[in-house]
Amino acid sequence: MLSSSLRALLVAAALVLPTFAHAAQPYEQKAFQSAQAANKPILIEVTAPWCPTCRQQKPIVQQIEREKPDLVTLDVDFDSAKDILKQLKVQHQSTLIVYRGGKELARSTGETDPAAIRSMISKAF
């Protein structure tokens, strides 16, 4: 039997942890191409750990991921993935790119308005 304080801690953790869960996977060309070939909705997030705008975007994207489990989210590290940034023609962190299969549908940099991000991602569905 759990003590009441341990039970309260477990309940609190269960309530808090899902808000920090992030389904994004690190960008890999193979995963991107596979999602494109399957005609899946794809969100590419270009992030940097030091970027305040990226930190504002993260919880919005996480909420959308929970609502749209079919969304494939790939995270590109702005500081270390310069070859990928060149390939995607990205010059700034906090860039979001939406694809459906092989077609780019939307792109934004620095957007933190939840409605605008939702609208952009909804184009892939």
Image: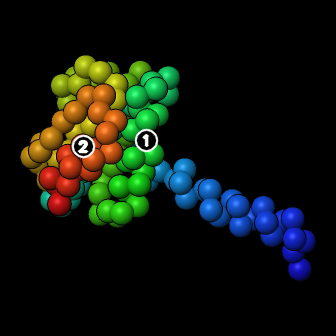
Task: Locate residue 94: give its quadrant.
Answer: top left
Please provide percent x and percent y for residue 85.
Answer: 27, 26
Per the image, label 2 sits on a secondary structure element best described as: helix
Q: CA distance from mark 1 to mark 2?
A: 14 Å
Point out the tag, 1 or 2, that comes first from the N-terminus. Answer: 1
Q: Residue at 84% of width from left, 65% of height from top?
A: 6
Q: Give the quadrant of the C terminus.
A: bottom left
Which of the pair 28/120 is nearer the observer? 120
Which residue position holds label 1? Answer: 58
Which label belongs to residue 116?
2
Q: Are marks 1 and 2 in contact (CB under 8 Å)?
A: no
Q: Amino acid at mark 1?
A: Lys
Q: Secondary structure at mark 1?
A: helix
Q: Is residue 40 above or below residue 58?
A: below
Residue at image location 18% in from the left, 25% down from the top = 89
Whether residue 113 sits left or right of residue 17 in the image: it is: left
Image vertical order of residue 67 relative to residue 76, above or below? below
- Please say whether residue 122 is visible from this viewpoint: yes
* Camera-side mark, 1 or 2: 2
> The N terminus appears in which quarter of the rendering?
bottom right
Q: Nearer the viewer, residue 34 or 58?
A: 58
* Above/below status of 124 relative to 67: above
Query: Looking at the rendering, which quadrant does residue 67 occupy?
Result: bottom left
In the rendered image, is residue 36 in sight? no
